[in-house]
Image (spheres, rainbow, N blue to C red):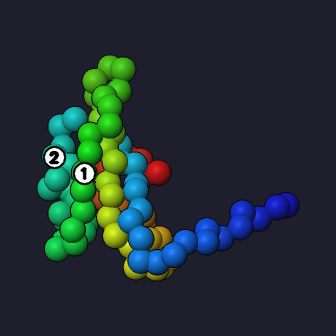
Amino acid sequence: METTPELQLDYPCHWEYKLVLSTEHNVTTIVEEVLEERMCEIRKSQNSAKGNYVSYTLRVLVHNADDRKMLFHMLKAHQHIKFVL
């Protein structure tokens, strides 16, 4: 089985996460709960075909690989976020 090579990034750098959540939840509130005081940029991407879900691009400064992965897991663990890419 082949293993995926580790990303070679120059930290600190900006990293983008794709978030998908239902339209009934406020993305800004959710991101503030997860990131607390951390600066970020949120851009709406698109709505699902039936309009039940909306995707966003979250851009945030990450300081190292552990920081990047920790944020991914924190976002993924939030009850109102359906998917994180």
How many numbered discs sit on the rendered protein?
2
Rendering quarter of residue 77: bottom left
Residue located at (61% from left, 68% from top): 7
- Image position of 3 (left or right of 67): right
Quadrant holding the N terminus: bottom right
Q: Is residue 50 above or below residue 42?
A: above
Can you see residue 21? no
Q: Residue furthest front?
A: 10
Instruction: Give the amino acid at mark 2.
Output: Asn
In the rendered image, the vertical position of residue 67 relative to residue 22, given as above or below: below
What residue do we see at 22% from left, 35% from top?
23
For marks 2 and 1 on the same chain, the one whose residue lies earlier in the sequence: 2
In this view, 49 is above or below 40: above
Q: Residue 26 shows which numbered tag?
A: 2
Which label number is shown at residue 42?
1
Residue 36 seen in this snapshot = yes
Please tell me which residue is depicted at 26% across the width and 40% down the height of the picture.
Answer: 44
Instruction: Tell me if 77 is positioned left or right of 35 in this view.
Output: right
What is the x, y in percent for residue 25?
A: 18, 43
Kind of residue sitting beneath label 1? Ile
How packed mark 1 is, by other alpha carbons closer than 10 Å (few <14, some 14-19, many 20 or more), is some
Q: Residue at point 24% right, 62% down?
A: 40
The residue most toward the right is 1
Question: Residue 3 at what x, y percent from top left?
Answer: 77, 65
In front of the other: label 2 or label 1? 1
Residue 32 x, y percent position in the rendering: 18, 63
SS at circle 2: loop
Report the side of 35 relative to 20 (left or right): left
Q: Give residue 53's position: percent from left, percent from top.
A: 31, 33
